[in-house]
Image (spheres, rainbow, N blue to C red):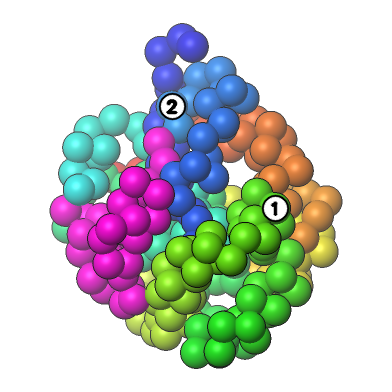
């Protein structure tokens, strides 16, 4: 790869880890892909996962300083979209340079509450709901009891964090927002899903075939879209401070 024009920092869906983005670099010609590993999964499995947004954002904001000295962007899927949004807000409050763009996938804008609360459901009901959302294919949760039991506490903690999140009204972010959505995603509102109201710059939507986890089938297209968008924004001098 040539010298990267931008670094894309990626935040996973509920229950997901950095491995969700492990092959993104194969499709990136001029973008460095960095996947955030949250506590409670993969190589941080022994750590307690966060169940409350403010504590997670405080931890991430403390680690994000070195990012802000060069062009960077945030990408978040589902729960990760909320995390990326709130971290951008925290960086603004700290007076740090903001991302070139905010890419949000599989999630309504933060001013909308989740239409269904599932984090409190008994085990079997919770698994049933997750499967109905197209979220537990073979790559995410193999049909082995020991793996299910290992991953479910972290998934439940993440769902608790997302579903108990309370939006605080505030001024729109001076950052372009790009909404990625699956055409058959049952969890996302039509159009820009309300994200246009969270930016004072501009908001655009890119739709892909598929459901909530459309990225699994369109990884190359998603990465190319992100990289093409960032190249265009940077060529226009769109870096926000």
Q: Residue at x 48, y 25 (%)?
A: 31
Mark 2 vs mark 1, foreground winner is 1
Task: Identify the mark at residue 93; answer none if there is no mark.
Answer: none
What residue sits right under mark 2 in the picture?
32
Residue 158 visible in rendering: no
Above or below residue 208? Residue 185 is below
Q: Earlier in the sequence, mark 2 or mark 1?
A: 2
Task: Identify the mark at residue 138; answer none if there is no mark.
Answer: 1
Q: In the picture, residue 166 is in which quadrant?
A: bottom left
Where is residue 222? Give x, y as percent. Answer: 66, 39
Residue 149 visible in rendering: yes
Q: Nearer the viewer, residue 213 or 48?
A: 48
Label 1, secondary structure: give it.
loop
Q: Give the position of the C terminus as an image quadrant.
A: top left
Few, some or many C-alpha atoms within 10 Å of disc 2 (few <14, some 14-19, many ≥20)? some
Above or below residue 92? Residue 65 is above
Q: Residue at x 31, y 70 (%)?
A: 50
Q: Nearer the viewer, residue 163 or 122?
A: 122
Q: Nearer the viewer, residue 62 or 18?
A: 18
Few, some or many C-alpha atoms within 10 Å of disc 1 (few <14, some 14-19, many ≥20)? few
């Amino acid at each position: 790869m040539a010298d990267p024009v931008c670094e894309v920092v990626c935040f996973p869906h509920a229950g997901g880890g950095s491995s969700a983005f492990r092959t993104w670099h194969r499709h990136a010609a001029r973008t460095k892909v960095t996947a955030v590993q949250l506590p409670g999964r993969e190589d941080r499995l022994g750590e307690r996962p966060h169940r409350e947004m403010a504590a997670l954002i405080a931890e991430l904001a403390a680690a994000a300083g070195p990012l802000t000295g060069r062009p960077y962007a945030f990408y978040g899927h589902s729960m990760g979209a909320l995390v990326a949004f709130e971290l951008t807000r925290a960086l603004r409050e700290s007076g740090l340079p903001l991302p070139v763009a905010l890419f949000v996938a599989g999630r309504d804008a933060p001013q909308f509450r989740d239409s269904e609360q599932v984090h409190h459901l008994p085990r079997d009901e919770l698994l049933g709901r997750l499967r109905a959302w197209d979220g537990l294919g073979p790559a995410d949760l193999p049909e082995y009891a020991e793996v299910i039991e290992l991953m479910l506490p972290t998934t439940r903690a993440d769902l608790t964090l997302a579903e108990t999140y309370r939006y605080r009204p505030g001024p729109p972010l001076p950052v372009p927002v790009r909404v990625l959505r699956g055409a058959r995603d049952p969890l996302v509102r039509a159009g820009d899903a309300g994200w246009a109201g969270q930016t004072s710059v501009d908001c655009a939507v890119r739709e892909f075939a598929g459901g909530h986890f459309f990225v699994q089938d369109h990884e190359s297209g998603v990465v190319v879209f992100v990289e093409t968008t960032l190249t265009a924004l940077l060529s226009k001098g769109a870096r926000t401070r």
